[in-house]
Image (cartoon, rainbow, N blue to C red):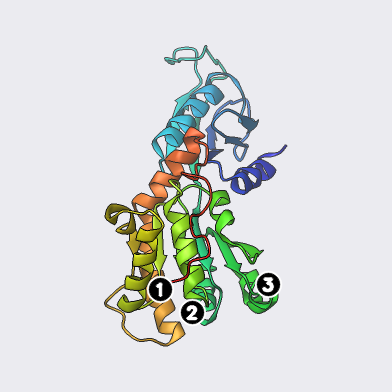
Amino acid sequence: MNWLDAAARLRELRRPGVLVTLVAVRGHAPREAGAKMVVGVDQVWGSIGGGNLEATAVAAAREMIATGATTPRTLDQDLSDHAETTYGRQCCGGTTTVLLDPLPVVGSVAIFGVGHVGQEIARILARHELDLHLIDAREEYATPAAIPELANGSATVHWHHTPWPEPLLRELPPGTLVLVMTHDHGEDAAIVDAALRCSHLPFVGLIGSSAKWRRIERVLREWGHDEATTARVTTPIGDPRITGKDPATLALSVCVDLIQRLAGGDLRDQLTTAAAGSARSAGSAGSARGEARP
């Protein structure tokens, strides 16, 4: 597998890596400038020349992965026989500069309910490098044809049509930010219930009024959630500085808040989880919703 395919594969599997490029060669070196390789947690694809040059770069790249580094760095090496080395002598005689460019695990957002507001949020988020899961029980809303312009965005969009969306929460990537805004307040309650039982989801946001939340919170208590657990739900959602109830304004408010969260601790936690290879956990199995509706 070449370095380009390897980078794409890591992106698809949501695993971190580092793109290593030999950016400058002065004198003799085992490879010419421009040679590339991709370093993962336990694999390497491609080569920048082997020996101490490559082994040192791999070790530095894996340190970046382990610490969740997101800023590129350079690494200068002397390939003379007088240079101090860690992984054996390399006597080519030249000097090199290597660029280590992180390939982080991107953020992930799941929108349950792709109605007017959900579509506007998707349009904004699709312009960012992230995984975007769009879920709806209504078939006509859970299809690329509903928002065709998303195909031109930077996000990787995953469409899910399911009349019973709660089990999907267990399959979402660790660190996914969850938004709940379906057309059915009873379904909203069921999704929030299932999300609160998933330990790998750090944010659960619910659209709606305080009156709606009081009813749903009462039902969640009946389903076994205590006050500390229901306090994990963020409602209302969005940046309070942006007011207005039309879908485009609501979407802007929500996305301002989400993007700040993705750039902060939630994304770093997600990256650390992915790098460590932690298994996904859904907490206690299934949803406790039964047939009750708020």
SS class of the residue under badge 2?
A: helix
- Ranked by sequence position, the earlier of labels 3 and 1 is 3
Q: Nearer the viewer, mark 1 or mark 2?
A: 1
> Based on the displayed image, in which of its 4 quarters is residue 35 positioned?
top right
Residue depicted at 41% across the width and 57% down the height = 223
Q: Residues within 10 Å of mark 1 (few under 14, many from 20)?
A: many
Residue highlighted by disc 3: 144
Classed neighbour count for the residue bearing mark 3: other residues with Cα under 10 Å, few (<14), some (14–19), many (≥20): some
The correct choice, above or below, for 262 with respect to 33 in the image is below
Specify which label sits upstream in the sequence, 1 or 2.
2
Amino acid type indicated by mark 1: Ile
The label shown at residue 117 is: 2
Residue 215 in picture, x, y percent from top left: 36, 72
Task: Determine contact: label 3, label 1, CB under 8 Å.
Answer: no
Instruction: Name the side, left or right, on which 145 lies relative to 205.
Output: right
Q: Earlier in the sequence, mark 2 or mark 3?
A: 2
